[in-house]
Amino acid sequence: MAHGSQLISHHSLLITHYSLLITHYSSLITHYSLLITLFSSLITRPSPLLLLPR
């Protein structure tokens, strides 16, 4: 019985570890996508500004 609970605790630790990894990577992906959006907006920003006076 003790061995089974040990296995369950080990699996829950693994699940917690992997969920933390997933959260970390998803936050990294969000961060990089925000950076990409920022850079693309910086790249595309001059063209609307050039079109405004016309």
Image: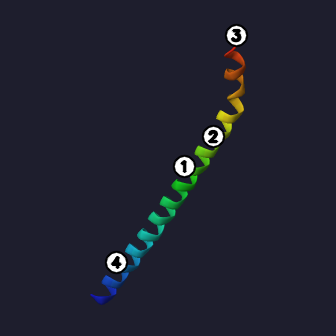
Find disc 2 in the rendering and name its residue.
Answer: 38
CB under 8 Å between callouts 2 and 4?
no
Q: Amino acid at mark 4?
A: Ile
Q: Secondary structure at mark 2?
A: helix
* Distance between mark 4 and mark 3 Cα atoms: 69 Å
- Give the label, 1 or 3, closer to the camera: 3
First in sequence: mark 1 vs mark 4: 4
Q: Along the horizontal axis of the image, is 31 left or right of 50?
A: left
Using the rendered view, name the quadrant where residue 33 is placed: top right
Q: Secondary structure at mark 4?
A: helix
Q: Is residue 31 above or below residue 4?
A: above
Q: Is residue 53 above or below residue 27?
A: above
First in sequence: mark 1 vs mark 3: 1
* Distance between mark 2 and mark 1 Cα atoms: 12 Å
First in sequence: mark 2 vs mark 3: 2
Find disc 3 in the rendering and name its residue.
Answer: 54
Residue lying at the far front in this picture: please name it. Answer: 53
The spot of residue 46 in percent (x, y) is: 72, 27
* Distance between mark 2 and mark 4 Cα atoms: 44 Å
Q: Is residue 14 above or below residue 37?
A: below
CB under 8 Å between callouts 1 and 3?
no
Q: Amino acid at mark 2?
A: Leu
Q: Along the horizontal axis of the image, is 14 left or right of 31?
A: left
Find disc 1 in the rendering and name its residue.
Answer: 30
Q: Amino acid at mark 3?
A: Arg
First in sequence: mark 2 vs mark 1: 1
First in sequence: mark 4 vs mark 3: 4
- Give the label, 1 or 4, closer to the camera: 1
Location of the C terminus (image quadrant): top right
Find disc 4 in the rendering and name its residue.
Answer: 8
